[in-house]
Image (spheres, coloured by chain):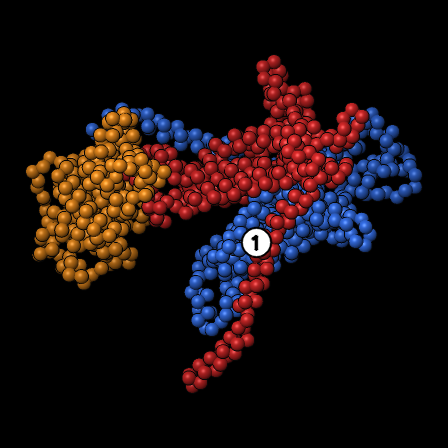
Chain colours: A orange, B red, C blue
Amino acid sequence: MTITSLSTGATVEIRNLKPYYGKRLAVRSVNMTIAPNKITAIIGPSGCGKSTVLRCINRMHETILGARVEGQVLLNGENIYASDVDPMLVRRKIGMVFQQPIALRTRSIFENVAIGLRLAGINNKRVLEERVEASLRAAVLWDEVKDKLNQAGTALSGGQQQRLSIARTIAVEPEVILFDEPCSALDPISMLKIEELLLDLRKQYTIVIVTHNMQQAARISDNTAVFMVDTDDGAPTGVLVEYNPTAKIFAQPDDPRTEDYISGQVG
Amino acid sequence: MAGAKAQTTTNFRERLAQRTQHGDSIFWAVTLFFALAVIALVVAIGWVTWNDSALARERFGIGFFASSEWNPVETEVSPESFGAVPAIVGTLISSLIALILAAPIAVGIGIFLAELCPLSLRTPLSFMVELLAAIPSVIYGVWGVMVFAPFFTQHVAMPLSESMREIIPWLSSSQVAAGRGLLIAGIILAIMILPTIAAITRDVLTLVPNTQREVLLALGATKWEVIWLAVVPYARAGIVGGVMLGLGRALGETMAATMLVGNRPQVPGSLLEPATTAAALIASELINAQSLLHESALVLIALTLFVITLLLNLIARLLIWFVNRGPVGSVRA
Amino acid sequence: MSLKSSQMPNYQRRKVTDAIMRGLVLFATACAIVPLVLIVGYVVVVGGSALNWEFFTDVYQPPMTVTTMDMIGAAPTGDAPFDPNDPFANLDPEALIGAEAGDEKGANILEAPARGGVFHAIVGTLLVTSLAVLIAMPIGILAGVFLSEFPDNSVAIVVRFACDVLSGAPSIIVGVTAYILVVNATNPNTGQPYGFSGIAGAIALTFLMVPTITRTTEEVLKLVPEATREAALAMGATTWYSTFTVVIPTALSGIVTGVMLAFARGAGETAPLILTVLGSNVLVTGLLQPIAALPLVTYRYTESPFPSENTLAWGSAFVLMMLVLLVNILVRIATRNRLRTH
């Protein structure tokens, strides 16, 4: 199942990816190609390994003690798991927004967004101000915070902090942004704001979003991957059961397990 | 059958409840009494040191803290007189030496244990640090007197004193051979407070939510940048608190100071000659006090030391509590 | 921009900084390990080699008594019996003048092998510390029960603060307090001060043990699941009944842990004992008079010019350190098991 695209943005190909926690295989070999400038949703019941797969895409999985990965992830054809690749540079190009809205404590709203730029060695005040403003505008947060950029980031509401996290991620201009259940800690109004924002961000970035909210996947994603828990050989292991355009997944899924899940019989 | 059984148990419970209906208020009163006893212990310390220092407070007033005369024995040339300056200077200098030497290293150990140490070494090493913090201070004193002082005097203090004679007078002394002084006491104090500061630093760093680390990692930060830009700022207040607890321990430490500072109640001209600290002065002179005034002056020094360490501990615990409480916005274990 | 190296202007610098700082942190840890290992190592090696059967079973014997006769060449001056508390009383000072290590006169003194032991100090430490634990236990445990059962009131906040103050206060201050309250207090029967005694030392140590026991008790009682408490209350038990029959037995091992830690802390404290029990060179079992204690033996014999007494100091330091380490390790094992079962 190849998904062609007219855009020239970053393509992510996952090849025989097998994430482990210690000796335990977390998800069976995953193969999927993530199209550029599209929103790809990963759905499935709890414990199916959807977040684990997402974290493998920017090498965050291995930062957990004892975790390791087999297989390949190609970013525009370049294997990010090659031995001479620096994971630090991979994460620079593939940003990530987490489940919990996180403002860095002891840092102002401005510094929360600027920190990635400062890491890159950009310390010119003018440049920083421009990039921070642009990122906050792109994250639709600018109007709410423009008068209090020096206040603590932790003083913002949950929804605002999540948009702050998005602003921080897009400030460093990645090619792909991974979202790990970005709305699960938010109220419905904040959630809708984030969803609008994601549809907007799709124009510039390749977006992968893990969600346990099927309606959300149906509303915003172009393609959807469905993961399930498989307990055939004793230990529960995640498995990719279907990867198709979202419209097809929700109308005529190929796999009966997908249908069961969509119709609420599983998970 | 089952109903009858339930009936008897109910009766039993009712009887029990009747018999114990006043139990809870007695229980409350008894535990309250002992809780108040804990408070009474603190009050006792304050009250006793306040009362028994009355004589010295009346005689010397605030001038006590400005006088460097300490003459317990009246002679024709020098009248009986007491001033706290030798004790204050000695305590502050030895504690500062300890803090300057120990704080950076101890914070480094805390960072190593919490962030960089391989998982298999983390638990045993952390436990070792806690064990070292529990070793009685007299043991550090024994080692200091029997092993470290001779070595240090021979190989460091004497050459240092020799070469600094013309350049930095306070690093040179004619009494360097005694092997006692503020520098050596400060070094032993530093070794003693290392485990204390390291253990607290490790504790507050492990309280930093993992999300704060992941944000920086996901932005492409190096391991050190994650530690320095996310973890340490988050726990900053707690680390400062740990350092202050270490300072409190150094200020009030008696045995290592008594054994290594030389117990000479004068403001020393050099870090290498015998001096005294507040705690060492009390330990060495109180039971041999020459007069009521002498005793009262020593108790006044004890009172001062108590108030200072109390304030330090209060501030330190507030800072550590501040980290424990976590930030307002992101609350996740 | 490739994934293998970067055009970011500061890329190399960041990599180098990362490596240097990680190296420095590792270096700091190594630096700290050196003196700490040296201290523990010296105590284990030198102190351990000072141990023998006599060390544990004999009381103090002055390094002089064997050699006094030889040196003076006659019976001690005067007919006074040998006083172990003052071995120099009958010594003819003339005999020592000019004595130096190595020559005939001094050889016996300065190279005398270690004799005697610290049985008196072990007994003294056990007596004083046990008495302190007996006084501190009811206060600490019941205050801890108060803190866990009635956690949110102004008294509880002040009690917690008092515990922090007590555990943070320099131990010499506690010694001063006990010195004034007990040692210097006038005995109404004799009109004289009570003087130094084991009891005074125990009271001083109580101040230091209470906060440990109180806070540990509070912590372990809080660990008892709320469901256990509620189950007892739902059966009609009153608060105190459920506390004493259900909550405290569940947390008993934890409370014992706190008491053991307090014992270990008290046994190692030296400064308060200098001002309260004074020390003694003979075996004393009464708590109303000056009594020996291991930390005091360690302190005083370290300062002694006689190598044989220094050896006793090392030995006592070894025993003290092992006591503290053993208790802490036991507590660690016990708490680990408790955490596992819950």
Query: Relative to A84, is C290 on the left or the right?
Result: right
Q: Which residue: 73% across, 36% down?
A: B294
- All told, the count of numbered labels is 1
Where does the image place residue C266, in percent across and percent down from the top left? 63, 48
Please state which of residues B221 and A88 is positioned toward the viewer in this rendering.
B221
Quarter holding the C terminus of chain A? bottom left
Residue B86 location, quadrant: top right
Q: Which residue: 42% across, 84% down?
A: B3
Query: Relative to B291, is B29 on the left or the right?
Result: left
Please state which of residues B10 and C40 is positioned toward the viewer in this rendering.
B10
Where does the image place residue B33, in percent across and percent down from the top left? 59, 60
Q: Secondary structure at mark 1?
A: helix
Q: Which residue: 67% across, 51% down?
A: C203
User: Mark 1 highlights which residue?
Assistant: C213
A220 versus B280 height, above or below: below
Asked if residue B57 can be seen in this view, the reply is: yes
